[in-house]
Structure formats: structure tokens, C-alpha cells
Image: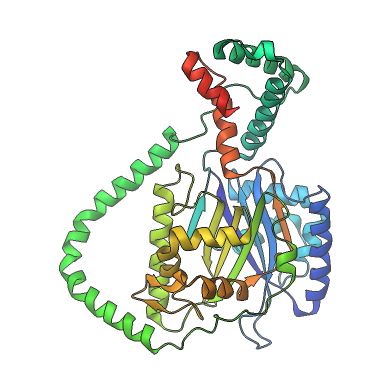
């Protein structure tokens, strides 16, 4: 299972301009194929600068390192130090408190990590190496079928599959790193079933406590809803029904390949109630994501590779997402398929479209929601994807092709498998 790493560090005011230049150089290096991230274990990664929480000089600009990676956090940070080399000093030397000793730098980064309030991954049982391997395997299988003549295509599906396996075994001699053995990746797996079992077990253990608390909840729930409704009615109307100004770099960095990314930052509304609500709604979202982590979609949206929400100490909520398709289609999917979930989270943040009882309206106002999203979206200085041409369906389809290479299949099963190829 991949892990979510979020490192948030304060930038020195006197080195902000220098840091912006370094990140621009690193972004060019990533575009040229010289990413500073550990290639064998990094699904996605980015560096992004967050503006000051307040205009006051005491509020620093923040540098965020986000990574979705395989293995342990400590292991990945060690690999980052090796792969980034002097680039790591060039970047974090612009941050307050960066130690000079290499041995202390990993501990410093670990000390600045923040947990995800909710984390989702579209293919939790696929490592970076498995995704790349299965992508290559699928490409080679397609080449084999494309080069067959009409006569060869008249063979039975079982014979075609046998010939394909033999051809791939010969290809493996030319590419020794290519793995043909059937993969366990794909829903459902024993690992994901075990995770679900542990979650269900925890819920069953919590059930007696919930029953004891039920009378108090029956009294508190109406009071909570009334208080929430008064807040909703007292808040000023949103101002996002007109086009908003936003950083033009956002559109320049979008929609030029299969995958896209989004960095979004917004302030939580004042008061303890809003903080309580958004924290607990995100806990529910995180639980649902864990229960559904072998399904490959979030709230019915099948285009999200990884997504996370992080609540910053300064009452801002940071959303980081890696997804397929265009910005417009991504936001459209959210509105069509997960509007209530979106509204339940972001109705607790400033400027969100008018909401009723936490879940209703809000994101259903498409124009206002998209304008609000643009207003609070940030330019991402550095973004890396290990396999930028692979969509979510590609990842699962590639894994299915690899699984189909193993064992014995009948004619009908072989025909269905060849349709995947």
C-alpha cells in the first residue's frame, strides 16, 4: 500500500525569491526526465509554495513537499536525500532551521510532516514498479497481436494466448527486468480484505459505546443542527457567480497529458464548531476511502489516482489531488457524483457557495463552485508522475493482462482476456 507524505516547512523571507528560482529549475529538470525523487518508489510528488496565512510579516510562506510513495516514510526520505543530492540543500537551505549535517536532515524533514485528515488511493496494492512493469507488458502484448497476419488471427483464443505467452517469454530475455509471473494486484486482494476486516472489527468493538452514547446523541443532534443552521443563515452570500481572477499559470500547466494535478488551499470559517465539523467529516471520508480502497473510485469518481486533505495549524485546509482528464471534467465529476461529500467538507470553509444543513446545495451550484475552486487553487511549482501516460483504467487493465498470463484458461476465458489486450 502506498503512503502519503506531507512535509510543511517555513520559508525564510530573505530567500523566497531564491527558492522560487530553484524550484523553477527543478521543474525544468523534471520535464526533461531528471526528477530528483526516488524513481523506484514514488508514484507522484510535488513541491508547492503556500502563500502567507495573513498579510502580517510574522506569517511565513510555507513550502510543501507532497509524495505518494511505496515503503516506509524513513526509507523514502533517505532515498530522497540520495536521489536529490545537492538539490535538497538548494531547496531546503531556503527554509528556516535546515540542518547542515546530512544525518540530521532526514529527521528534520520527518519532524515537519503533517498527517492527512483523509487520504485516498486509486490502486493501493500496486507498487510503482508493478505499474511500470504491467504497462510495458501490455504494450508488448499489443505489439504481438498487431503484427499477426489474418491467418494467424483465425486461431482459437487458447492458441493465441499460448503463442502470446511464448513471445513474451522471449521478450523477457531481451528485457530481464520484465516480470511475467501473475500479479496479485487488482480487486479484491487478501491484503485489502484484511484491512476491511480490521476496520469492521473496530466498528463492532465501538458499537457498545455508540449504543451507550445514543441517548446523548439524540438530544445533541437537534441542537447541533439548529446551531449549524443559524450559522449558515448568518454567513454572507458567496461572491463567486461572476468570473474570478486567478493565476494564468494554472491553465498553462493543465490538460497537456493524460494526468493532471490540483493544489487547493482555503481557510476554515471561524469558530470551534466549524473546526469540529470539518475534522469529523474528513474522518468519515477517510474511513470510507479505506473501506472502498480496493474499488478504484472515490465517491463514484473513477479518475483519481491519489487525493488527500491536510488541516494546517493555521486553520487552513490543503487539498492535493492527482487525477485523469481535464480540470473541467474532474470538477464536473465531483459535482455530478459527489456533491454532498464535497459540500460536507468545504461548506466549513470561507466563500463556499451557500449551503443548507451542511450537505445540500453548495457544490450543486456548478458555476459558483468552479469559480470558488479556481480562486483558491494554487500554482504547483514542481510536479512529478512516475507513469504520466497511465490512466486509472490503464493501471487496472494492465494488471488484468498480467494476471491472465498465469494458469490455464478455457476458450471463453481466453477470449475475454484477449479483449483486455
> Is residue 107 rendered to the left or right of residue 198?
right
Q: Quadrant of residue 342?
A: bottom left
- Taking the view exactly as shown, the residue that stands out farthest to the front is 150
User: What colour scheme has been applied to the protein in the rendered image?
Assistant: rainbow
Q: Position of residue 254 (x, y in %)?
A: 70, 60
Question: How many numbered dots are placed on residues in this image?
Answer: 0
Task: Say whether residue 333 is visible.
Answer: yes
Query: Residue 226 at x, y = what percent?
Result: 27, 82
Front one among 229 and 34: 229
Query: Can residue 99 be seen by looking at this rendering?
Result: no
Give the left or right position of residue 396, taking residue 357 as reference. right
Q: Quadrant of the C terminus?
A: top right
The one nearer the camera, 143 or 230, is 143
Up/down of 360 relative to 262, above or below: below
**Which is nearer the eye, 146 or 319?**
146
Question: What residue is at 42 percent from the left and 71 percent from the top?
Answer: 278
Please tell me which residue lies in front, 269 or 80. Answer: 269
Say if 172 sits above or below 216 in the image. above
On the image, the x and y values in percent for residue 368 come to: 53, 76
Name the residue rendered at 57%, 44% in the picture: 392
Q: Measuring 61% from the left and 14% from the top, which residue is drawn there?
A: 160
Q: Is residue 203 left or right of residue 28?
A: left
Residue located at (55% from left, 77% from top): 314
Instruction: From the top left corner, tell me how far across and down residue 246 is, in percent.
Output: 68, 76
Where residue 158 sits, quadrant-wise, is top right
Q: Is residue 167 left or right of residue 406?
A: right
Amino acid at each position: 500500500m502506498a503512503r502519503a507524505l506531507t512535509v510543511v516547512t517555513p520559508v525564510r523571507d530573505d530567500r523566497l525569491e531564491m527558492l522560487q528560482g530553484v524550484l523553477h529549475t527543478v521543474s525544468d529538470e523534471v520535464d526533461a526526465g531528471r526528477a530528483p525523487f526516488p524513481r523506484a518508489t514514488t508514484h507522484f510528488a510535488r513541491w508547492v509554495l503556500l502563500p502567507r496565512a495573513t498579510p502580517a510579516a510574522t506569517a511565513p510562506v510555507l513550502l510543501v513537499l507532497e509524495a505518494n510513495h511505496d515503503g516506509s516514510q524513513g526509507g523514502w526520505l533517505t532515498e530522497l536525500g540520495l536521489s536529490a543530492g545537492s538539490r535538497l540543500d538548494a531547496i531546503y537551505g531556503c527554509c528556516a532551521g535546515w540542518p547542515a549535517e546530512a544525518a540530521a536532515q532526514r529527521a528534520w524533514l520527518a519532524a515537519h510532516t503533517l498527517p492527512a485528515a483523509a487520504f485516498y488511493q486509486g490502486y493501493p496494492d500496486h507498487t510503482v514498479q508493478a505499474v511500470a512493469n504491467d504497462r510495458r507488458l501490455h504494450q508488448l502484448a499489443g505489439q504481438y497481436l498487431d503484427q499477426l497476419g489474418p491467418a494467424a488471427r483465425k486461431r482459437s483464443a487458447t492458441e493465441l494466448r499460448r503463442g502470446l505467452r511464448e513471445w513474451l517469454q522471449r521478450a523477457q530475455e531481451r528485457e530481464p527486468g520484465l516480470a511475467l509471473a501473475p500479479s496479485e494486484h487488482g480487486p479484491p486482494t487478501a491484503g485489502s480484505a484484511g484491512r476491511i476486516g480490521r476496520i469492521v472489527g473496530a466498528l463492532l468493538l465501538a458499537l457498545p459505546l455508540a449504543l451507550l452514547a445514543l441517548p446523548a446523541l439524540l438530544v445533541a443532534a437537534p441542537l447541533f443542527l439548529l446551531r449549524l443552521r443559524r450559522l449558515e443563515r448568518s454567513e454572507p452570500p458567496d461572491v463567486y457567480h461572476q468570473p474570478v481572477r486567478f493565476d494564468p499559470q494554472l491553465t498553462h500547466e493543465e490538460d497537456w497529458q493524460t494526468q493532471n494535478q490540483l493544489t487547493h488551499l482555503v481557510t476554515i470559517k471561524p469558530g470551534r464548531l466549524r473546526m469540529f465539523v470539518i475534522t469529523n467529516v474528513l474522518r468519515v471520508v477517510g474511513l470510507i476511502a479505506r473501506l472502498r480502497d480496493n474499488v478504484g473510485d472515490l465517491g463514484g469518481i473513477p479518475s483519481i489516482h491519489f487525493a488527500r486533505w491536510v488541516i494546517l495549524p493555521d486553520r487552513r485546509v490543503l487539498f492535493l489531488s492527482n487525477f485523469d482528464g481535464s480540470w473541467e471534467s474532474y470538477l464536473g465529476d465531483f459535482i455530478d457524483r459527489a456533491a454532498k461529500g464535497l459540500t460536507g467538507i468545504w461548506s466549513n470553509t470561507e466563500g463556499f457557495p451557500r449551503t443548507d444543513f451542511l450537505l445540500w446545495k453548495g457544490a450543486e451550484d456548478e458555476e459558483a463552485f468552479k469559480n470558488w475552486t479556481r480562486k483558491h487553487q494554487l500554482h504547483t511549482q514542481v510536479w512529478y508522475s512516475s507513469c504520466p501516460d497511465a490512466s486509472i483504467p490503464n493501471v487496472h487493465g494492465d494488471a488484468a493482462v498480467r494476471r491472465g498470463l498465469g494458469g490455464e484458461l478455457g476458450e471463453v476465458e481466453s477470449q475475454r482476456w484477449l479483449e483486455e489486450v
